[in-house]
Amino acid sequence: MDLKKILLFILIMGFCSLSAQRIAIMGAMDEEITMLLDSLKNKKEIKKEGVTFYTGKLKGRKVVLLKAGIGKVNAAYSTAILATNFKLKAIIFTGVAGGLDPQINPGDIVISENLVQYDFGELKAGAFKTWPTKNLAQNNDRNPLYIPVDPYLLDLGKKVSEHIELRPFEGKTPKFFVGTITTGDTFLSDTTKAKELYSNFNALATEMEGAAVAQICSMLKIPFIVIRSCSDNANTQAHTDYFKFVKVAAINSAHMVLEVLENYKRP
């Protein structure tokens, strides 16, 4: 085979790698995708616009993994670069969060039903009013304040939660919750604010990326879901609990993603 044919072969293989339809799996930090990367078969690394992607197969499904970075801007940027360079069936965001519902303990799993940006809005006379974001892809119309996840992925997540076995947390079996997750550019370690988010949004958990990813997915019509394992309760002990539980929480969230992939049946 001459040099031209070799180069053409490499180019074709690279194009096929990018053009194949895949399920994207995102996490904000290394800990949130390490288990999945270790399980990835036929792994190939691709770098685009500062974001590193890993293609391959998990549970027999073609996937692309990436670390999105911490915070809403990083998450939105990574999602946009992802969607620009890959044909996507769906996006699953995995990782850890702070629990808000008093019934939630570190280790419990929250499956998002919808997501809301709690820190986007107007501060006037000491009172903050949350605004819905705008959809640039649809005549600048307003997005729903609570952006809903994909119904199929939500139903699949619920079904998986009925039979999956997760790693115990301090002798306790993790429980599953389904509902609202709030997103803001703050690592929350404040009991008063945690109670406020729970009361104002009826939210189960809070984190720093999910609603930004939801906004981009909604604009681009990409099915998505956010699955979080709680590493803390977003209270004054959050910083301590986070470092104590983050690895196990991330592993359980990743294990949940693997089960979702294994049971994924949509063409």
Image: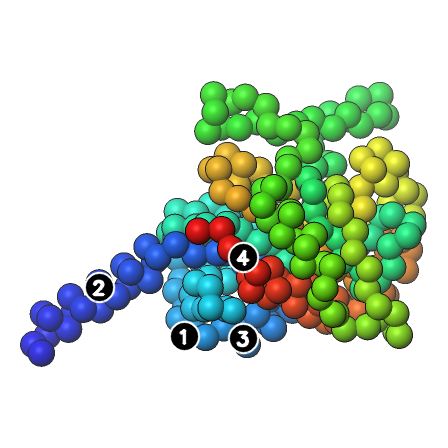
Marks 1,3: beta carbons within 8 A: no
Q: Is residue 192 left or right of residue 248?
A: right
Q: Residue at x 39, y 47 (%)?
A: 84
Marked residue nearer the N-terminal end (3 or 4): 3
Task: Look at label 3 and name its amino acid.
Answer: Ser
Check residue 42 in the rendering and tell me which mark sits there, or answer none.
Answer: 1
Residue 81 x, y percent position in the rendering: 44, 49
Q: Is residue 118 left or right of residue 237?
A: left
Marked residue nearer the N-terminal end (2 or 4): 2
Marked residue nearer the N-terminal end (4 or 1): 1
Task: Look at label 4 and name its amino acid.
Answer: Tyr
Check residue 264 in the rendering and tell me which mark sits there, or answer none.
Answer: 4
* Discs 3/2, front: 3
- The secondary structure type at the circle numbered 3 is helix
- The secondary structure type at the circle numbered 4 is loop
The CA distance from mark 3 to mark 4 is 17 Å
- The secondary structure type at the circle numbered 2 is helix
User: Quick check: 221 above or below 101?
Assistant: above
The CA distance from mark 1 to mark 2 is 18 Å
Where is mark 2, residue-wise? 11
Marks 4,1: beta carbons within 8 A: no
Does residue 48 show up?
yes
Task: Look at label 2 and name its amino acid.
Answer: Leu
- The secondary structure type at the circle numbered 1 is strand
* Discs 1/2, front: 1
Where is mark 3, residue-wise? 39
Check residue 226 in the rendering and tell me which mark sits there, or answer none.
Answer: none
Q: Residue at x 69, y 70 (%)?
A: 251
Residue 200 x, y percent position in the rendering: 84, 33
* Discs 2/4, front: 4
